[in-house]
Amino acid sequence: MTHTGTRGARNSTGSGPLGLSRRVSSGPAQSSPGTSGPSANRSSTRAQLDAILDQSELSGVTVRVIPFDVDGFAGASAELLYAGGRVPALDTAQRDTPEGSAFMDAAARLRSMRTLFRKVEAVSLEPTRSRDYIHRLAKEL
């Protein structure tokens, strides 16, 4: 697609509400990120979980948890963001690396990221079960 064609496609995608779908691994949700001391860790983790629950109540936002016991995602601990819409040529994926963020917009990499996100969605808990799971974890802290 030409630069002009891409810009035209971007402009024709409409101005409806944007949706956000967030997948959360239960590993980070169950761990306590370090601040200082065990109670600070619990407090910080609870605040993070509460923030995710608050975001999940917003219109256009979906939160899904990937349980710890799901096979196939060992070592998949890097943050990954996939921004997509009606025009796949405009999609972008972003992955955190030790050197910083890496943005991917090449067609082959985007196909790979779309496949990964479909696999993640297939094994993640439904939104209601995900909220219940996060709420239970927050209460346990």
Image (tube, rainbow, N blue to C red):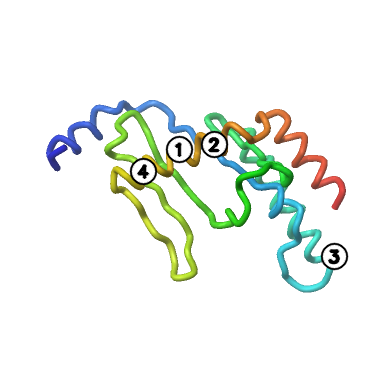
- Distance Cα–Cα, label 2 vs label 4: 14 Å
Q: Say which of 34 and 28 sits in front.
A: 28
Query: Which of the two discs, 4 and 1, labels the residue nearer the N terminus?
Result: 4
Which residue is drawn at the image coordinates 39% and 59% (left, top)? 102
- Distance Cα–Cα, label 4 vs label 1: 8 Å
**Mark identifier at residue 110:** 4
Image depth: mark 3 or mark 2 in front: 2
Element type at marker 3?
Answer: helix
Task: Confirm or deny contact between disc 2 and disc 1 (CB under 8 A).
Answer: yes
Q: Please name the amino acid that badge 4 sits on.
A: Leu
Q: Estimate the x, y position of residue 63 in percent, counting from the top left.
A: 62, 37
Query: Which of the two discs, 2 and 4, labels the residue nearer the N terminus?
Result: 4
- Distance Cα–Cα, label 3 vs label 4: 41 Å
Which residue is drawn at the image coordinates 59% and 31% (left, top)? 122
Query: Which of the two discs, 1 and 3, labels the residue nearer the N terminus?
Result: 3
Element type at marker 2?
Answer: helix
- Distance Cα–Cα, label 3 vs label 2: 36 Å
Read off the residue under disc 3.
Answer: 39
Q: Please name the amino acid that badge 2 sits on.
A: Lys
